[in-house]
Amino acid sequence: MHRTAISDERLLAATDEQVTFGYPDTATQQRKACTVTADEFMRRYRQPVPPPG
C-alpha cells in the first residue's frame, strides 16, 4: 500500500476491545479524540477498500 487510511500518529490507544484515535474537528479547529469498538474501527478502516474483482 502506498498510503494508509489512518496514520500511526492519529492512533492514541488500542486494546482488544477499543480503539481511540484523534481527529481535527473542522467546526472548532480543535483536535478531538474518538473511542470506538475494535469491530467498528475495522469497519470504518475497510470502508474505502473496494471489494475483490
Image: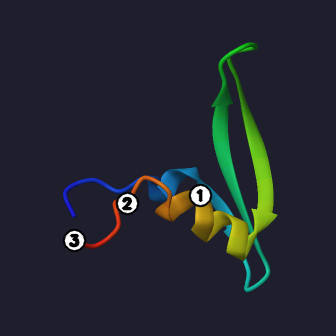
For discs 3 and 1, the disc positioned in front in the rendered view = 3
- Residue at 27%, 53% (x, y): give it: 3
The chosen color scheme is rainbow
- Residue at 65%, 18% (x, y): give it: 26
Mark 3 vs mark 1: which is more N-terminal?
A: 1
How far separated are the C-alphas under marks 2 and 3?
12 Å
Q: Quadrant of residue 16?
A: bottom right
Q: Mark 1 points at which residue?
A: 44
Name the kind of residue labelled 2 in the image.
Val
* 36 relative to 46 in the view: left or right: right
Question: SS class of the residue under badge 3?
Answer: loop
Give yes or no for contact between labels 2 and 3 (Cβ–Cβ under 8 Å).
no
Name the kind of residue labelled 1 in the image.
Arg
Q: Residue furthest front?
A: 53
For discs 2 and 3, the disc positioned in front in the rendered view = 3
Vertical placement of 39 versus 41: above or below? Answer: below
How far separated are the C-alphas under marks 1 and 2?
10 Å
Vertical placement of 10 versus 14: above or below? Answer: above
Question: SS class of the residue under badge 1?
Answer: helix
Quadrant into which the C terminus falls: bottom left
Name the kind of residue labelled 3 in the image.
Gly
How far separated are the C-alphas under marks 3 and 1?
21 Å
Within 10 Å of the Cα at label 1, are there few (<14), some (14-19), or many (20+) other Cα atoms?
A: few
Q: Mark 2 points at which residue?
A: 49
Q: Quadrant of residue 27?
A: top right
Mark 1 vs mark 2: which is more N-terminal?
A: 1
Residue 32 pos. (x, y %): 75, 36
Label of residue 53 in the image: 3
Question: SS class of the residue under badge 2?
Answer: loop
